[in-house]
Image (cartoon, rainbow, N blue to C red):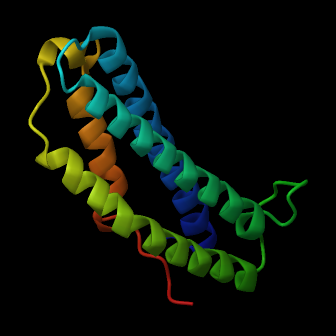
């Protein structure tokens, strides 16, 4: 089993990556709808994607605040906390932050998984279908705690 310090680093790194990836896919999808979609529902979808991207950005800001308050010894050093007490405190605060995030992420996921699939001509890019990539990234963010990754020790 990984040490608490390894878990802290992993949680910080992985959660940050998943937030960034989901935000990027929402932004790219929004651009595709603006550029390619001529349907009547375009404005509604663009507004939903814009709001979702703004929400993900607020989560990233919350995450960034957590990093500066709990992960780093000082904001200037950006050196990860070293003492066992500080590490466990950071892990506990991560759990609380994540609990705040997950409920709304699940609602966001329910919304996008309940929508009818948009025209593939709008969402298809050379690297794949942006709609499916966005949904996969959103699901990976929602399932962060259930993906079989190491559990955070109790604080």
Q: Position of residue 25 (x, y in %)?
A: 38, 31
Q: Could you tell me which residue is drawn at 53 percent across and 55 percent down?
A: 59
- Quadrant for the C terminus, please: bottom right
- Using residue 28 as the reference point, say whether residue 17 is left or right of it: right
Q: Is residue 44 above or below residue 92?
A: above
Q: Looking at the picture, does residue 41 appear above or below residue 139?
A: above
Give the farthest residue toward the front: 40
Which quadrant is the N terminus positioned in? bottom left
Q: Is residue 144 visible?
A: no
Residue 73 in sight:
yes
Extreme residue toward the right, this view: 76
Residue at left 61%, top 59%? 62
Query: Looking at the image, which residue is at 45% across and 65% down?
Result: 101
- Given residues 54 and 154, the one toward you in this image is 54
Q: Is residue 57 above or below residue 34?
A: below
Q: Quadrant of residue 110?
A: bottom left
Query: 138 left or right of 100?
Result: left
Q: Along the horizontal axis of the image, is 112 left or right of 8?
A: left
User: Residue 116, percent across and down?
Assistant: 9, 37
**Most foreground residue, 102 or 14:** 102
As drawn, the residue found furthest toward the bottom would be: 155
Q: Nearer the viewer, residue 47 or 13?
A: 47
Residue at image point 40% right, 44% down: 52
- Give the x, y percent position of residue 17: 50, 44
Q: Quadrant of residue 91?
A: bottom right
In this rendering, the count of numbered labels is 0
Position of residue 82 relative to residue 30, above or below, is below
């Amino acid at each position: 089993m990984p040490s608490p310090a390894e878990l802290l680093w992993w949680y910080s790194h992985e959660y940050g990556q998943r937030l960034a990836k989901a935000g990027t896919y929402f932004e790219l999808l929004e651009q595709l709808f603006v550029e390619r979609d001529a349907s009547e529902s375009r404005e509604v979808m663009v507004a939903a994607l814009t709001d979702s991207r703004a929400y993900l950005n607020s989560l990233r800001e919350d995450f960034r605040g957590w990093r500066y308050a709990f992960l780093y010894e000082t904001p200037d050093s950006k050196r990860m906390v070293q003492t066992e007490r500080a590490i466990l405190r950071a892990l506990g605060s991560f759990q609380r932050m994540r609990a705040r995030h997950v409920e709304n992420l699940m609602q966001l996921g329910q919304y996008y998984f309940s929508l009818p699939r948009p025209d593939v001509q709008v969402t298809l890019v050379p690297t794949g279908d942006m709609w499916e990539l966005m949904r996969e990234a959103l699901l990976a963010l929602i399932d962060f705690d259930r993906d079989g990754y190491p559990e955070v020790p109790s604080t």
